[in-house]
Amino acid sequence: MADTTVRIDGNTLRLPGGVAVRFIRTLRLPETGTHPLPPGLGEFPVRRVSDYPDTVPEAWRARGGVMLPVYLREAMWLSFAGTTEPAALQVGVGKVCAVSGRPWSGRLARKPQNYVVLPRQPWLDGINSGKGTVRQFVAVPLGMGATVEGQVTGEEVWGGVQLQSFPLDDRELARWREQERLRGERDVPSVKTGGGFGAALPMAAPPAPGAVPAPGAVSAPAAAPAGRARAAAAMGLGVGGSMRQEVYQDDRPLKHWAKEPAGRVFVHLVTPPEWRRITGEAPPESPVDRAAYTRAGLPWFDYYDEDAQDLARTDTLGAVRPVGDWLGDDHEPWQDPAPHQVTPLKDAPGKPVEDGDW
């Protein structure tokens, strides 16, 4: 039987089939206009729910998975750098597909496509809004109706992020591996640079593309403070500003993918005070001031793949309104990056994570 275990390796989630996912902190975009890709400002810390049985909410224990701390209106994106084999990855926000806007499903679909194709899709910064754009993932509490889940379904029950991976079927995977073997024999060995937009970046240094951290053992989590588990302030994802990013159309026949998922994981989003209470760890510092970042002359990014076809926006996701419609304008200053600050890209074993019932 195939291994369906999801593992946590540092702050990287590793799903069966060679899929690697990291959650990256970033600058929140204004909700008007279309912008370049914002930088990666470091990884969100990720911890297993099962390591804190006495302090996580009972519902979280039942769902299993992992958790990470996020501030109100903080933006994030998902990095898939380090994925080693072709995979179809479903990304849910409150069990609403971030690509199609359809309800969460245990099967891949094409009309509309309800997954991203890895490793061709290097990252995902938000929900698919078509015409080469996405609308940024922005954290908001459940109960206000501002999440994608609340706007699409009329309820806010799940929150968080859901991931589910599908490998190629056995025949196609064997064929792909043989092609890679032959290609490796033909290629002349060369020194590869450690590139990749969205590395974990210390704020003492200017953010810039960097390499995926090398795998290593997960350090033991901090001891959870004593006390009875109680309900936590659950968070979900709404949307913010628009940026230039394609969500690529799959060019393989649907029948080439496995019919059943190889692995899945529920990612709980928790407020910084609850993170400290549950884990005993200090949460990350509050997000960076975006105007100060731009004034400092630090880079933004632009990624374009001329050989790929972008997915069209669905009506469901097109109707999702930004979080500012609920929370109001927080008047955070904005300064457009100068042209020289936009950098063109491309054409320009750890501990297992317990799954539960969700």
Image: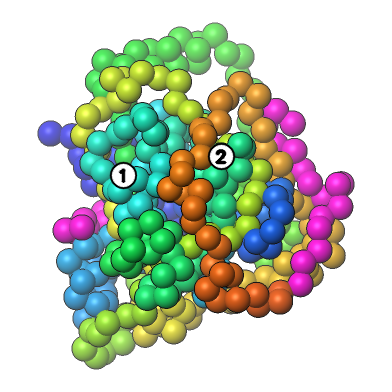
Is 280 located above or below residue 284 in the figure? Answer: below
Pick the residue in front: 43 or 157.
Answer: 157
Amino acid at circle 1: Gln
Is 177 located above or below residue 277 in the figure? Answer: above
The residue indicated by pointer 1 is 164
The secondary element bearing badge 1 is classed as strand
Label 2, residues with CA under 10 Å away: few <14, some 14-19, many ≥20? many
| CA–CA distance in space, label 1 to label 2 | 22 Å
At x 22% / y 29%, what residue is drawn? 259
Using the rendered view, name the quadrant where residue 76 is placed: bottom right
At x 33% / y 67%, what residue is drawn? 156
Label count reads 2
Does residue 221 belong to the magenta stretch? Answer: no
Label 1, residues with CA under 10 Å away: few <14, some 14-19, many ≥20? many
Is 217 located above or below residue 271 in the figure? Answer: above
Does residue 339 belong to the magenta stretch? Answer: yes
Q: Which residues are magenta?
A: 333-358
Where is residue 244? Give x, y as percent.
Answer: 66, 43
Tell me which label, 1 or 2, sits earlier in the chain: 2
The circle drawn on residue 130 is 2
Where is residue 321? Give x, y as percent.
Answer: 53, 60
Pick the residue in front: 228 or 357.
Answer: 357
